[in-house]
């Protein structure tokens, strides 16, 4: 035998309608069943009260009935209403003579008292001898030892219960039909916010990623769902934007790296081909070719080293964590700069505004001394490369509070590649300020980007790759600090390394 049950509704709307209809139908059936049972019990109790309150005929009448006196045949019915009384003689046999109306089929009683399946004074129900009627019967004993069975028909009770049953069936059918229609409307109205969410999600998927859900009432479940989905959509959009920006930066990075490598490679390739030619060249031409090849190879080596360092820093390197003194770090860098760049006078002083009295003191911080020294040397080298000869360079160190004056937070004219520090927090600061021409805002905004040069030709002449400030900013961020720039055209550049104070 093959067959399949009908599948249950898969949609939320269909499931809600089915569940509500089933529950209400069960509640209506239960209430109707309870009413039916209560009414039937009450009607039977009324019949039982009539049976127990029935008074048998007089003893003389019963004696005459016992002798089957023919005169009783023409006597008027002595019993009230629909009562009918049956007698059993001394031998326990059912007597043919009975009292009461003969209009309805008699109850089905056994011929002998031994077959009576009833207890005295306990009403019970028996079927009629024909048809589908029922009788309520009660067994009693008379004073002279006879047994009588008092009976009442249940036609009225059965009729009332039958009408009630049909009325319940009709009411149930009407209720279920009305409930289906009403529940469809109520569920449809209740799920309208979900329908709007569905339409909005479809539009977002197709062509409108900036669209957001309108149902965001925090007092409803659907509204809270809308708020969460809007937050998720915002995060996804930001993530996609960051991914696109990252891919764009990667493509630009690869293009810039290829452009930087192309120049020295071209020079090496050209002079290598020149060296393979059979023509004889002078010693001076040979030395010049060798110098250019060596310079190009050195430039390529520096660029590859910077790229490897950036790749290492991008992978969250493990920095050393040591107690260091920024003042000692700055003093060593200033001494080294005086040897390598005598054309630019460099001085070391305390952090503070002009006119303020301050003294040099220990500036404690925690970090990797080698990497932090690399930042300071990079800043000093950057000042020498991008300013004219004899331009003074000032190195200042100190401890201050993060803010507009001390650094570490954003303000107009200040540029950084990292997030600001908490305003008011204690920070250790190392500044490298020059008195050069400064930078225009459009150049200052990109100065920490990889391969960016405000003066490309000057940088290449000095072997720069445009990666120094990007490396320094990455190292500072890895120390939970940041590298920032304060500058304006004609006012010089002030690069500031800001670290959380130890």
Image (cartoon, rainbow, N blue to C red):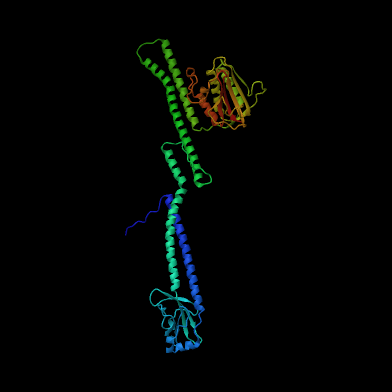
Can the viewer see residue 325 in this picture? no
In percent of width and height, residue 205 lies at 42, 39
The residue drawn where x is 42% and y is 14% is 289
Can the viewer see residue 200 in this picture? yes
In percent of width and height, residue 376 lies at 56, 24
Q: Quadrant of the C terminus?
A: top right
Position of 247 relative to 259 (above/below): below
Classify residue 370 by image quadrant. top right
Foreground residue, 328 or 125?
Answer: 125
Position of 396 relative to 69 (above/below): above
Foreground residue, 355 or 295?
Answer: 355
The residue drawn where x is 45% and y is 35% is 240
Foreground residue, 191 or 245?
Answer: 191
Foreground residue, 501 or 148?
Answer: 148
Q: Is residue 284 left or right of residue 471?
A: left
State the count of labels.
Answer: 0
């Amino acid at each position: 035998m093959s067959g399949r049950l009908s599948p249950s509704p898969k949609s939320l709307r269909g499931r809600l309608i089915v569940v509500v209809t089933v529950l209400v139908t069960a509640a209506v059936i239960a209430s109707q069943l309870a009413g039916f049972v209560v009414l039937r019990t009450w009607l039977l109790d009324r019949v039982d009260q009539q049976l127990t309150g029935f008074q048998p005929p007089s003893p003389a009448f019963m004696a005459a009935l016992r002798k089957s006196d023919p005169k009783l045949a023409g006597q008027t019915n002595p019993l009230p209403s629909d009562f009918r009384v049956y007698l059993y003689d001394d031998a326990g046999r059912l007597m043919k003579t009975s009292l009461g109306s003969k209009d309805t089929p008699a109850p089905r009683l056994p011929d002998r008292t031994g077959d009576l399946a009833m207890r005295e004074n306990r009403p019970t129900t028996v079927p009629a001898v024909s048809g589908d009627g029922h009788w309520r019967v009660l067994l009693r004993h008379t004073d002279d030892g006879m047994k009588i069975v008092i009976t009442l028909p249940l036609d009225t009770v059965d009729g009332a219960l039958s009408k009630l049953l049909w009325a319940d069936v009709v009411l149930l059918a009407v209720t279920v039909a009305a409930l289906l229609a009403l529940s469809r409307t109520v569920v449809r109205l209740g799920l309208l916010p979900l329908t709007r969410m569905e339409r909005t999600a479809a539009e977002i998927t197709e062509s409108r990623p900036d669209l957001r859900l309108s149902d965001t009432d925090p007092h409803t479940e659907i509204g809270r769902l809308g708020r969460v989905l809007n937050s998720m959509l915002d995060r996804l959009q930001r993530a996609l934007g960051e991914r696109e920006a990252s891919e764009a930066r990667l493509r630009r990075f690869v293009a810039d790296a290829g452009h930087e490598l192309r120049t020295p490679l071209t020079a090496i390739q050209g002079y290598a081909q020149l060296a393979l030619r059979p023509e004889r060249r002078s010693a001076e031409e040979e030395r010049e070719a060798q110098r250019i090849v060596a310079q190009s190879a050195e430039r390529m080596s520096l660029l590859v080293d910077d790229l490897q360092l950036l790749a290492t820093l991008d992978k969250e390197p493990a920095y050393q964590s040591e107690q260091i003194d920024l003042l000692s770090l700055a003093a060593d860098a200033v001494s080294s700069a005086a040897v390598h760049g005598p054309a630019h006078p460099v001085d070391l002083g305390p952090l503070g505004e002009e006119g303020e009295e301050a003294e040099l003191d220990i500036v404690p911080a925690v970090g990797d001394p080698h990497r932090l020294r690399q930042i300071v040397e990079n800043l000093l080298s950057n000042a020498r490369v991008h300013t004219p000869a004899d331009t003074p360079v000032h190195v200042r160190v100190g401890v201050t509070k993060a803010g507009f004056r001390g650094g570490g937070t954003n303000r107009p004219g200040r540029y950084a590649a990292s997030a600001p520090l908490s305003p008011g927090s204690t920070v250790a600061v190392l500044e490298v300020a020059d008195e050069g021409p400064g930078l225009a805002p459009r150049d200052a905004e990109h100065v920490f980007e990889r391969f960016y040069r405000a003066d490309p030709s000057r940088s290449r002449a000095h072997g720069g790759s445009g990666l120094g400030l990007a490396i320094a900013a990455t190292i500072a961020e890895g120390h939970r600090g940041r590298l920032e720039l304060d500058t304006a055209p004609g006012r010089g550049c002030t690069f500031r390394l800001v670290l959380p104070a130890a």
